[in-house]
Amino acid sequence: MAKRQKVLVLYLKLPSLEGEVISWATFDGTGKKLHMTGDSDEPPYPTGLDALLDGWRLFQASQAIPEHPGQEFRTSYLKHEFFFEKLEEGDF
Amino acid sequence: MAKLLTTEQMAEFANSGCLFFDELIDEQTNKEFLDDIGHTEIDEVDSVQDYYRNIKATSSIPRIPAGTKLKDAYPKGSPLEKIFAHEVVDGAIKSLVGSNTIIDHQFLHITFPTKYFKQANQRQMSQQNHQDSTIDPRSTFDVQLFYFPTQVTKAMGGTRYHPGTHLRIVNEFGIAKYQNILGQKSIVCKPGTIGIFHSGLWHGAGVNFSENIRYMFKVRLQPTEKQELLWDPEKKYQPLPNRALYWTDESKDKTINDILMRSYPWQEADTNRLDKINVVKFWRLLTGHKKMDVDYWLTRIENELY
């Protein structure tokens, strides 16, 4: 049996896993489903904590980086990024 | 006679980064545009490259060197000349980028349906989210005008866009990893619809699962003058006085300030406040009122006594 990784990336309203999901992306290494941009209007989970409760393992979270002096009001990329994974066994 | 935008429409643009004019262009002009580009059914299309080659060879859409004045760009009597001469289109352009706007670039975006990808044995994917065209920290802004000559149904995908993202400074496809963003919208519209985006608005082409080809003609326009009160040449706009915060008076009517302060579901709890500050800064530039504020966001932090 081979193992394949499924990756779920959640962007939250807060830097805490209790924060609501505001953006999401899924990459399925099993090849069972092809996800693409704009494929769902509803988030897969209400919060990051709900993803943990469903068995997703957190493996990376964004750091809190102080704003550069003089650039305090500049806005850019989504801030609170959390990477999760699930490993799936099967004949791929 | 150009029909300039209203202050409400300008506030909507300042807050959301986009404006739409549904079914603005008449049926005859839409037909002329489609005939001009040689629109056909998908069964008649052998390859994307050949289809574009044919349109470039036979249509009246000219090659326009970057920096050409819009008023000199399109042949007299051509469908595109008629579209840009429409009083609402003309007025919106003059309100946002002035009377002497120049063309950055134009393109006819064509999104082919599933049948084409099956025939060509290619994977059919949507376009990832991006911001045109490089990182752009200017206060000056360009606009992208979109023209949809046919109906765009939900199955046809439409141009996906994210209202309120236009003031977030990112570098083109640096936002491609956000597959879905809460509150995302797609342009599903009737024939002849015109959309205008702030050049910073996050967007991408949706996948076309219909039976028909989707068209979107785009022109990016740059101003050659300061974008201050272009929609209000008599300078009638005056900022509103401060209002109560948090312990608010709900009996008051909605105002321009409510349009400016609208939030979006994709905004983080903390950065949402910076998004509001940036809308106020943008409104200061658009109105020329350098000290104006909405809901004390800037006044509070400009009260520096040391």
Image: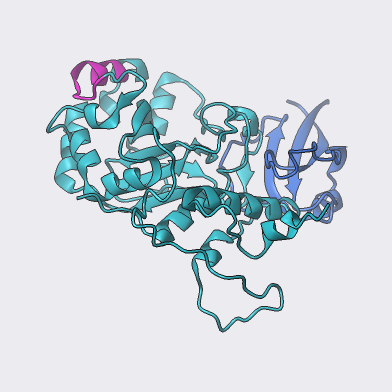
Left or right: where does residue B42 sit relative to residue B287? left
Stretch of the chain drawn in magenta: B52-62
Count of numbered circles on the image: 0
Horizontal relation, residue B68 to residue A4: left or right? left
Q: Is residue B248 magenta?
A: no
User: Is B124 displayed left or right of B81 in the figure?
Assistant: right
**Which is nearer the eye, B113 or A33?**
B113
Q: Quadrant of residue B44?
A: top left
What is the chief secondary structure element of the magenta stretch?
Answer: helix
Magenta-colored stretch includes residue B54: yes
In the image, residue B141 sits, relative to residue B56, either above or below, namely: below
Towards the viewer: A46 or A65: A65
Which residue is the extreme one toward the left? Answer: B77
Left or right of residue B57: residue B129: right
Q: Quadrant of residue B65?
A: top left
Spot occupied by residue B186 in the image (x, y as percentages of width and height): 47, 47
Q: Residue at x 69, y 38 (%)?
A: A77
The chain letter corresponding to blue is A
| Residue at 67 percent of width and 30 percent of height | A31
User: In the rendering, at what x and y percent does residue A43 appear?
Assistant: 67, 51
* Residue B158 in sight: no
| B51 w.r.t. B95: above or below | above
Q: Residue at x 56, y 26 (%)?
A: B134
Asked whether the viewer can see residue B161, the reply is yes
Colour of chain B in the image: cyan
